[in-house]
Amino acid sequence: MTQALLNGVVSGLLIALPAIALSLTYGILNFANFSVGAMITAGAYLAYIANASFGAPIMLAAPIAAVVLALIAIAIQHGVYRQIRNADHVTLLVASMGVAFVLENVTRFFYGADVRTLDVPVARPLLWNGLRLNHEQLTIAVVALSAMVVVGFILKRTRLGRAMRAISDDPDLAEVRGIRRARTVDWTWALSGVLTALAGVLIALDGVVDPTIGMNYLVSIFAAAVIGGIGNPFGAVAGALIIGLVEETSALAVSTTYRQGISFVVLVLVLLIRPQGLLGGARVRR
Amino acid sequence: MIGSADSLEVRNVSAGYDASDIIADVTFAATQGRIMTIAGPNGAGKSTLMKTLAGLLRPRQGQILIDGRDVTQLSPPQRALAGLGYVPQERNVFKNLTVGENLRIGFEFIRRKAPTGEFIVARDRVLELFPDLSPRLDDVAGTLSGGQRQMLAMGCALIPGPTTLLLDEPSAGLSPRYVTVMMEAVAAVNRSGVTVIMIEQNLIEAMRIAHDVVLLVAGEIKGTWDSDTFLSDPLVRALFLGGAKAAGADHDRISDDASAA
Amino acid sequence: MTGYLVAILTFVSLAVLLGFALNLQWGQAGMINFGLAGFYGVGAYTAAILSKQGADGFTATVAAIAMTAGLSAVVSLATLKLREDYLAITTLAFSELVRLVLTNETWLTGGANGIRDIPRPLIGIVGGEGYELFFLLLCLVLVAGTYLILERIIRSPFGRALRAVREDDIVAATLGKNVLALRVKAFAIGGAVVGLAGALHAYYFTYIDPGEFAGFVTVYAFMAVIVGGKGSNRGLLLGACTVMILLEGTRFLKDFVPFFSAQQAASLRLMMIGAGLVLILIFRPDGISSEYRLSIRKSARSELNS
């Protein structure tokens, strides 16, 4: 059981990264980015390209993937979302569905449905007090925690972070106070790209790289963000940990294939009971 | 009265939210260093006018000039950089951020290159004006009382040192003590050289500090007065003060303006 | 050649039915169904499983319709009072769950291998030769019938109430409309149409597997609906044809560009569909024709957004 809890925490930390990305773009752009799963997949493939095709060690491939995906995300913002005149949250939502489709199939086009793995050194799992923590899990925990600390720092202590929180709070007032929306939005997408790319790499570390890896986490990510209060990046972390724990502990009772099914049930329950999430977020009711 | 000593000039501006215009062919000017009040019945379009001046609403026609510079095509951040400060009537602070952060935001995006030291100085000046805020710097703005929020909102607009200040109902919903505080603050700010344009329902208080008045009825400017003569002018009484008819005629405008607020 | 045409037209009929459903759920009631493919799968599998158990075509189809409508109603209940995003997430998640069940519960669904040799309704009477044509005619009749029924619904007080709720549900509630009931009904009726389409899909192809009911079905449907103008069933006919042309057109891509593998050509086609959806949203978000509640309201609304 404790092993399940440990696995759950690690899993939660992993999901936290894209959940934060989702909450950030939701809070600032006011729409749910359905392409977050596809972005994870893209990030993993970018790292794969740097790693397997160009021989970069994973420590280098990961940041490369992060930067490239950040740029891609900004490009999509300018090429797609900004171009949509009637930019209400529904249209953007449907557009992100289209974007997800394109991203996923671009990777499929170049790499097919084959399963690939990253070229990483193999290491022995750590054993402590009867608990097993394999090397990939440790990496996930360290990277995810570091990323969260950095994001937290940005949000709380930098001008950019204040701009992001201000726009999230009240976009019109933010403009009046001199905040340039377009710039801040670009940075938000960049951050989103970095977080999802890192998540993609971490997922690939512990498993494989194939076109469906991002999609497999989509429901969990949304559930995590909703539990924490969508639009609240700090809540997303809490939500992710909860989802991680629920998924891993439920694996003791239910087959792991239905992991997403469990998250679906949790999502529905939260929406029925407390849709604004545990820590509350923005714009829930119609 | 349109000339080069005008802080703010509005020329033939028309604006609205859907197919119809709420304000039509509005022309007036605010002289530098003076306080101007925009008066008018409910639904006249005062808030809409202010939003247009602030840049939140694009005018369908006309021009807006700040210190002689055409800002009609400029976005709100650009207008803020041009020296315009704006305190909306509602939703004028970031409720989820602290008082200190609100003030910091008010400063740092307009005075981008200024070092932190200058921020501290500007902040302290605001806190002198509104001492009630000092003990609450680390409190989230949503927990402030109505009066404190208004003060914070004004403080945020003042902190970057604007040349022209737009105030939408600065005393709305405030208790008499806060009304006095606010009005005194406005007068003090004006004495330091800032041009003020304000919408104020509380005409008695407004006339006490204002120099000029412009009357807006049903989206049209009916004239400009000196604050001493405004209340006694028979035309004003007919159009606005006694004029229940004039106010009533705007009945279907009221909902427009309410949605504009 | 005729065979090919018959096949194309049959696909279009199925797509049109899905489009009708989405037009009702999204166009009229403002409810985003990102899980359309999942519901489609539910309809197809219900019909298939029952048919293989010996049920006749009619009963199995009715069961498929009922099952899909019922599940639609249940799924929509969770998010009715919330913003559209939440229904989108929930329906997508539901669709994922359906996919998982279809792939894993082999005892019921045949797992990843799917179900083969689904008995076609009335095959005994019609015989093998002209069946495809017969089936196409059956589909066309059903499409026409559904169209008429839906148009009736759209123009009825129920339809007006739905649109009122879509525009501003707070106002509608104040006026006494039971917002919840209206939305559940609309979603369920849409679900029924999806179930019908699913059953027809099963009978036409006689072989179904979980892979057919994946995201791309949803994206096609959205595209067809948007191209035709959200809410307009007449426009949808045009939209469905456009999407189908795009689909089939890209199928021939393989012949012109031989150095793509089959897998790549397939991905390319899907990529183009996704890109097509995005392009439509940018350039023609209102589609080609529009709602029957006409142009005055539309132009006023587009001014509001500018």
Image (spheres, coloured by chain):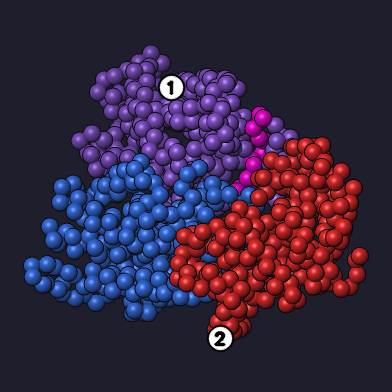
Chain colours: A blue, B red, C purple
- Secondary structure beneath dot 2 equals helix
User: Looking at the picture, does residue A130 appear above or below residue A251?
Assistant: below
Please, what secondary structure does the residue beneath circle 1 have? Answer: helix
Residue assigned mark 2: B117
Residue C289 lies within the magenta run: yes
Q: Residues within 10 Å of mark 1 (few under 14, many from 20)?
A: some
Residue that mark 1 sits on: C131
Q: Quadrant of residue A199?
A: bottom left
Q: Quadrant of residue B204?
A: bottom right
Q: For the residue marked with disc 1, what is the amino acid?
A: Tyr
**Residue A228: horizontal and vertical position, in percent?**
36, 56
Q: Which residues are magenta?
A: C280-293
Q: Chain of mark 2?
A: B
| Residue A169 x/y as whole percent | 52, 60
Question: Which x, y percent locates residue C26?
Answer: 52, 36
Residue type pointed to by label 2: Gly
